[in-house]
Image (cartoon, rainbow, N blue to C red):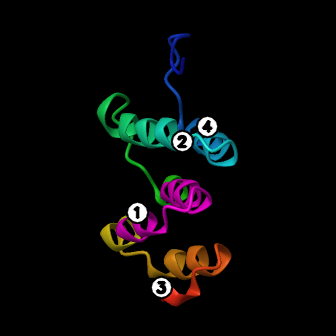
Amino acid sequence: MMGSSGVPPDDVTFIGVLSACSYNGMVKEGLELFESMKCKYQAEPGIEHCACLIDLLGRASQVNDAMKLVEKCQWNLMLLFGVHYWEHAELI
């Protein structure tokens, strides 16, 4: 469990765990972790964290959810990369 040692996770820890969730298809866990950054750890997700989350959703073929996140964050370049990478160019 993150933070059980009494040392709060830092930005790099979140990136590592979100990436691990992405590569292992752990969508639910990744989404929960992303939410816990703000709620539980009072950490503001950066572009790197959002990129991990977009990758997570793309790998799980949840492209529409990834697009909603990009629109919310207004990072259109990431959308172009993600859509191209996941072979959903028809959405551009």
Q: Which residue is mark 3?
A: 91
User: Foreground mark, 2 or 3?
Assistant: 3
Q: Earlier in the sequence, mark 4 or mark 2?
A: 2
Please tell me the numbered disc located at residue 11. 2
**Is there a contact, CB below 8 Å, between mark 2 and mark 3?**
no
Q: Which residue is mark 1?
A: 65
Q: Residues within 10 Å of mark 4 (few under 14, many from 20)?
A: some
Where is residue 51? Give x, y as percent. 54, 61
Q: Earlier in the sequence, mark 2 or mark 3?
A: 2
The amino acid type found where label 1 is placed reads Asp
The amino acid type found where label 4 is placed reads Val
Q: Residues within 10 Å of mark 1 (few under 14, many from 20)?
A: few
Where is residue 73? Give x, y as percent. 35, 68
Disc 2 secondary structure class:
helix
Q: Residues within 10 Å of mark 2 (few under 14, many from 20)?
A: some
Real-space Cα distance between discs 1 and 4?
20 Å
Q: Which residue is mark 4?
A: 17
Real-space Cα distance between discs 3 and 1?
12 Å
User: Foreground mark, 3 or 4?
Assistant: 3
Q: Main secondary structure of the magenta part?
A: helix
At 42% from the left edge and 71% from the top edge, which residue is drawn? 67
Q: Earlier in the sequence, mark 3 or mark 4?
A: 4
Q: Which region shows up in magenta?
A: 50-68
Real-space Cα distance between discs 2 and 1?
23 Å
